[in-house]
Image: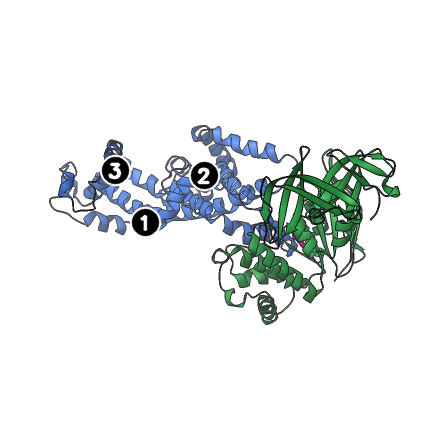
Chain colours: A blue, B green
Amino acid sequence: MKAAAFPPGLMMPHIRPGRILCWTLLFIGGVIMVTPLLFMLSTSLKDASQVYDLRVIPETPTLDNYIEILGDGRFTRWLMNSTIVAVIVTLSNVFFDSLVGYTLAKFRFRGRYIVFIAILSTLMIPTEMLVLPWYLMASQFGWIDSYWGIMFPGMMTAFGTFLMKQFFEGVPDDFLEAARIDGLNEFTIWWKIAMPLVTPALSALAIFTFLGNWTAFFWPLIVTTSAELYTLPVGLSSFAVEQSIQWEKIMTGASIATLPTLIIFLFLQRYIVRGVMLTGLKG
Amino acid sequence: MATIDLNRLIKRYGHTTVVHGIDLSVRDGEFVVLVGPSGCGKSTTLRMIAGLEEISGGEIRIDGRVVNDLQPKDRNIAMVFQNYAIYPHMTVADNIAFGLYRSNLSKSEKRQRVEQAAETLGLSQLLDRRPSALSGGQRQRVAIGRAMVRDPAAFLFDEPLSNLDAQLRTQMRIEIKRLHHRLGTTSVFVTHDQVEAMTMADRIVVMRDGRILQVGTPLELYENPVDIFTARFIGSPTMNLLPASLRDGGADLALGGSVQVPSAAATSADILVGARPQDLVPSSPGVPGLTVSGTVVVVETLGSETLVHIESAGQTVIGSAPGRQIPQIGEHLTLHAPAERLYYFDEATEKALAAR
């Protein structure tokens, strides 16, 4: 196209090849990410006979699966279990990780560096290696098949502590010293002054902890034995074991289970993006 | 109000001593400025008075009571920080009220105190705003408000004007001074800016390398500096120091010419003759004193006066001319300072040789 074809004063837009490549890659990435979600939603709207029909839009869409799943007392129980576990573990992480992170960042005491290194070193141990000691511990304390058994390994994390320590280090000491002069005790300084100043980090930690626990499968599967204590991912997997593979039920359950994640993403998108930017952590 | 006494106050970090046993008495209601270059120990001293740094030795008394082991909150002092330290998540009113966190006043009394402080500082219209919506000067006023609302025994200021631009700094300097006159609260102010020290202090404490070099009123320090460091630190532009060798009844200047030296100052072979730029003016040497001739290399027009840099025998000397008399660069100029305006220092010890 000739430049003269554009209205006077306007230049022909210059499209760089790098930009085209970037957009193409993003589009392909988007398709790869969204396709499974679409199939999950599509399958949840099909009856058992249409499950292997790979059309995205079902021939005869039905909400029967949703009615059946939500009417099944087990599913709502698993939903509640996942909510209880994810909320308590998130609150615990926000509280304890930030408390320890603050202490390591703002107090000078003998052995501080060793404590920090010890906490950090636990990051290098893979979960698979920890499962056996966790299980033995849970077994000896009688925590198998209990909420506490599901939650205790994640109540405080080394990564959360490290993350919060890094953020608290950015809080100017002047704020804390001014509060000390104004008569606040150390706990109140942490709660009233330091915590509100690290809200972006707290949001990121809370969001990622919640999502991590909401989707956790491996440890809840090991530590729970009765169906009443299953979390949602474990419960959904039982559809594949107990009654052959009921894909339409699994996908319906998964669609419902994805809802909180989507809602969180929609409303807290800003914090998630900021969290990823600030921490280099992905959900 | 209160007195503050430091007795042989020491601060060590490991094996490094940063404050070497200093003694200082701040009188009730006095405005004392600690001044010195970065790393001289002035902020550390202030923080020890506040209780934010533990002391390694000596004694601190506030209003006669030893406070060495008291927590900051129990010392009844208020501090204003360089970075304001006002909480970004609270409104101006909440920030000021935070100074009353431990007080037993009723809610309405607290509100009244906050409003009173806000009115004094011109913040009444800004009470509901967050710090992010305030200018640097307003933020600093909020910090001062939080300090004054508590009616403390003493105010401690840690370079509170450093983050402000030049115009605002001058304005805040005047406001703090007026506030001090109104409240009469004992104040210790730390700065590295000698102009701030000169304009605000009842007494200035000059510090260097963790030691107090001189304590005195601004004029005492300007007129009678005890050593070269204080002489150069106090006064702007800095004092000219010209090397000279003593001979009978006078001294030969390294850049040529000679000056008469009072007998009390004639105790060392090699001396430095000091002259403040304000005293070194273009005139004919009709009276005894210091005369320097040279070529004008830089002219700084300030309006009220003109600073003239002349080069003579390889040394640059700064003098001053009336505001409307602007010499030309490259012009030959003779500057003269009367003998009674000269200072004499021992080149080896850097100490003043005679009180003026």
* Circle 3: element type: helix
* Label 3: few (<14), some (14–19) or many (≥20) C-alpha neighbours in 10 Å: few
- As drawn, A67 above or below B142: above
Quadrant assignment for the N terminus of chain B: bottom right
Q: Chain of mark 3?
A: A
| Residue type at the position of mark 3 | Gly
Q: Which residue is mark 1?
A: A266
Q: Chain of mark 1?
A: A
* Label 2: few (<14), some (14–19) or many (≥20) C-alpha neighbours in 10 Å: many
Return the residue nearer the eye: B203 or B342.
B342
Q: Are marks 1 and 3 on the same chain?
A: yes
| Residue type at the position of mark 1 | Leu
Q: Is residue B183 left or right of residue A135?
A: right
Q: Over which residues does the magenta segment extend? A: B150-163
Q: CA distance from mark 1 to mark 3?
A: 17 Å
Total numbered labels placed on residues in the image: 3
Residue A24, image x, y percentages: 23, 34
Residue B289, image x, y percentages: 78, 45
Q: Earlier in the sequence, mark 2 or mark 1?
A: 2
Quadrant position of residue B57: top right
* Circle 1: element type: helix
Q: Which residue is mark 2?
A: A144
Q: Which residue is mark 3?
A: A30
Give the dominant element type of the magenta stretch: helix, strand or loop: loop
Q: Earlier in the sequence, mark 1 or mark 3?
A: 3
Foreground label between 2 and 1: 1
- As drawn, B174 above or below B222: below
| Residue type at the position of mark 2 | Ile
